[in-house]
Amino acid sequence: MAMPFVTTDVPAGPQLGNAPRFDDLKGLAIGDIAALPPDMLLTLQEAALAETARVKRLRDRLEAGIGQRYEAAAATARAAQGKTSGTVRIEDDGITVIADLPKKVSWDQDRLAAMAARIAASGDDPTEYLEIAYRVSERRFGAWPEAMREGFASARSETTGKPVFRLETRDR
């Protein structure tokens, strides 16, 4: 059957002689991948990044099309329910479309601090009404004098995330 659309798909990475292609990785053991020469790892990593970007572009287009198709119906359904945000269900030819419009709330930190001060001044406990969180920017912490950093050190903990390795050639 002929495809009704022209495809813009690219091969999943260049072929390096008898080297594995990006799609071949699913059949290789992690140890076998780790044993590949660095230039093959670089090529495979570049292929993975290109494929990820390609899939993201396609998914973004798909989601935009779905949004265009159902946005007005979802807004109408929300209005009928007296909602400005949240989840509604729409039926379309036997398919249930679950349309969610999340609510995002932000609070003016200076005004909240003033409210907390007024609550405390009236004799009430501000934590009965507010969640109070303290944070220190890592950049600011690093710029503080050593004596100041030492005073805060016991309140600071540091963890690490998942390691990321990016391969490049020397000429890049």
Image (cartoon, helix red, strand yellow):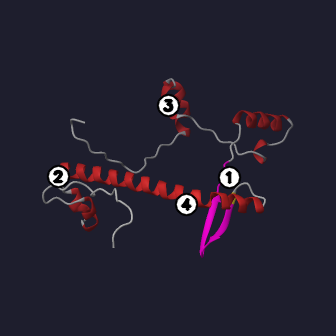
Q: Are marks 3 and 1 in contact (CB under 8 Å)?
A: no
Under mark 1, the amino acid is: Lys
How busy is the neighbourhood of tag 2: few (under 14 within 10 Å), some, or many (20 plus)? few
The residue that disc 4 covers is 66
Q: Earlier in the sequence, mark 4 or mark 1?
A: 4
Q: How many marks?
A: 4
Q: Which mark is residue 37?
A: 2
Q: Earlier in the sequence, mark 3 or mark 2?
A: 2
Q: Which range is magenta?
A: 87-104
How busy is the neighbourhood of tag 1: few (under 14 within 10 Å), some, or many (20 plus)? few
Q: Earlier in the sequence, mark 4 or mark 3?
A: 4
Give the CA distance from mark 3 to mark 2. Answer: 38 Å
The residue shown at (24%, 49%) is: 42
Which quadrant is the C terminus positioned in? top left
Secondary structure mostly seen in magenta is strand
Foreground: 63 or 25?
Answer: 63
Image position, residue 33 (x, y; %): 23, 59
Under mark 4, the amino acid is: Ile
Image position, residue 171 (x, y; %): 21, 35
Foreground: 150 or 7?
Answer: 7
Q: Earlier in the sequence, mark 3 or mark 1?
A: 1
Q: Secondary structure at mark 4?
A: helix
Indicate yes or no whether the magenta region holds residue 100.
Answer: yes
The mark lying in front, picked from 3 and 2, is: 2
The mark lying in front, picked from 4 and 2, is: 4
Q: Are marks 3 and 2 in contact (CB under 8 Å)?
A: no
Give the CA distance from mark 4 to mark 1. Answer: 20 Å
The residue shown at (33%, 57%) is: 9
The residue that disc 3 covers is 139
Asked where in the image residue 69 lies, by quadrant, the reply is bottom right
